[in-house]
Image (cartoon, helix red, strand yellow):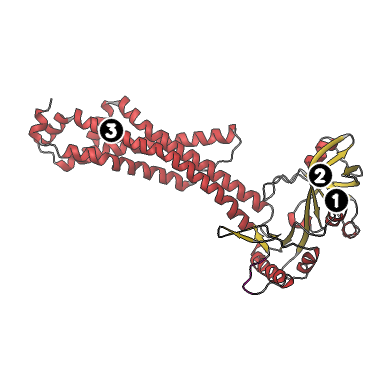
Amino acid sequence: MTVVIAFKALARNKLRTGLTMLGMIIGVAAVIAMVALGTGAQRAIEDQIRGAGTNMVTILPGSVMTGGARQGGGTARLAPEDAAALRALPTVDYVSEGVQSRQQVIAAGANWSTNIVGVNVDYQQIKSWPVRYGGFLSEHDVRTAAKVCLLGVNVADNLFGADVDPTGAEIRIRNQLFRVIGVMMPKGASSSGQNQDDQILAPYTTVLKKLQGREWLNYILASAESDDRVVRMAQAIATELRQRHEIAEGEEDDFRVQTQDDLVAARTAQTQTMTTLLAGIAGVSLLVGGIGIMNIMLVSVTERTREIGLRLAIGARGADVLRQFLIESVVISIVGGSIGIAAGFGVAGILRDYFQSPTLIPPDAIVTAVGFSAGVGIFFGFYPARKAAGLDPIDALRFE
């Protein structure tokens, strides 16, 4: 009976009830949309990083402590001999040296600024990266520091045109002529966010000797046969490099062994922080909506004082009146929150289609939104309901 009375009271003032719900609708929709945007970005980062191979680790030179966190840098270096030593480890299946150099490339009257990435023959297996045209590097190319290269699809399109096989053509990098031996398949962004299609692969020995004139590597890539061996592989690599670099027990490593899980954690931590911030800002709308509910319910108590007094005079208890007004506020919150969830799905769809932003709405976000809406209704509706229940029947009947 109390529920029916509460619904009839809300139906008598449809416009006011709808406007009161509006605060909850906007707040819940904003929270759902922001969570969808942040969760979608996080999932995209995870897929992007794991797409590069969950059984891969990256060894980087240097390790310094900044603000309690270990960061890259330092004066330590990785040498080709370090990579050669890792190949002898039983837990390591593939190893590739890695060097990078940003250069201007000229070919057939066109020029393009891109990354020249020096790698070894195992690089293709580590990255699971097939060739579109031509063939990959050979051990002879690496051993002799041959001036050969493979183009990323973006580089090939900009230098030679779309869907053109440039195999056998020559390009100029600095003062050196390189022969193109192939073009890689489209790959997309790497785990670090770099566009892998906008780069040129060449023997690392060639990049070191012909383009950079140094002996040190930027990084080493290694991979295991399966992802369940990655942890053991990373530990074995760390032990081997500590011995090679003569690092005493208790001293900090002068290198970093970074797994794909480490990359996922580092990249998603940033998106989680931003998602929390955006959701917090959107949550302010829920607070405003809750205050709106309390305000309207207080007005309703004042307007319906004689009605409340009449109910109390004919036998209704204060608990019945309290329950009625709580039900009204909870209904406003839950219905508004439900509409807000639907609106949030719509906003998330617009963000996905119009701005090409990945979105994902986790089920627990929906459950939390409904629960939070009900909680807002109870919290902000309790005071008006208690005030209504505490009215004196005689004074209420005299109220004008």
Q: Amino acid at mark 3?
A: Asn
Question: Could you say where residue 245 lies in the image, as x and y percent from the top left?
Answer: 73, 70
Label 3 Cα crowd, 10 Å radius (few <14 / some 14-19 / many 20+): some
Q: Which residue is mark 3?
A: 295
Check the picture and name the quadrant holding the N terminus.
Answer: top left
Badge 1: residue crowd in 10 Å (few <14, some 14–19, many ≥20):
some
Image coordinates for residue 237, horizontal then vertical, percent = 70, 68
Of helix, strand and loop, which one carries label 2? strand
* 132 on left or right of 291: right
Taking 354 as reference, is 181 left or right? right
The magenta region covers 249-253
Q: Quadrant of the C terminus?
A: top left
Give, as a three-letter code, the residue at label 1.
Answer: Leu
x%, y% of residue 193? 67, 47
Q: Nearer the viewer, mark 3 or mark 2?
A: 2
Q: Secondary structure at mark 1?
A: helix
Q: Is residue 335 visible?
A: no
Q: How many marks?
A: 3
Q: Quadrant of residue 265?
A: bottom right
Which circle's residue, 3 or 1, is located before the other in the chain? Answer: 1
Q: Which residue is mark 2?
A: 103
Q: Earlier in the sequence, mark 1 or mark 2?
A: 2
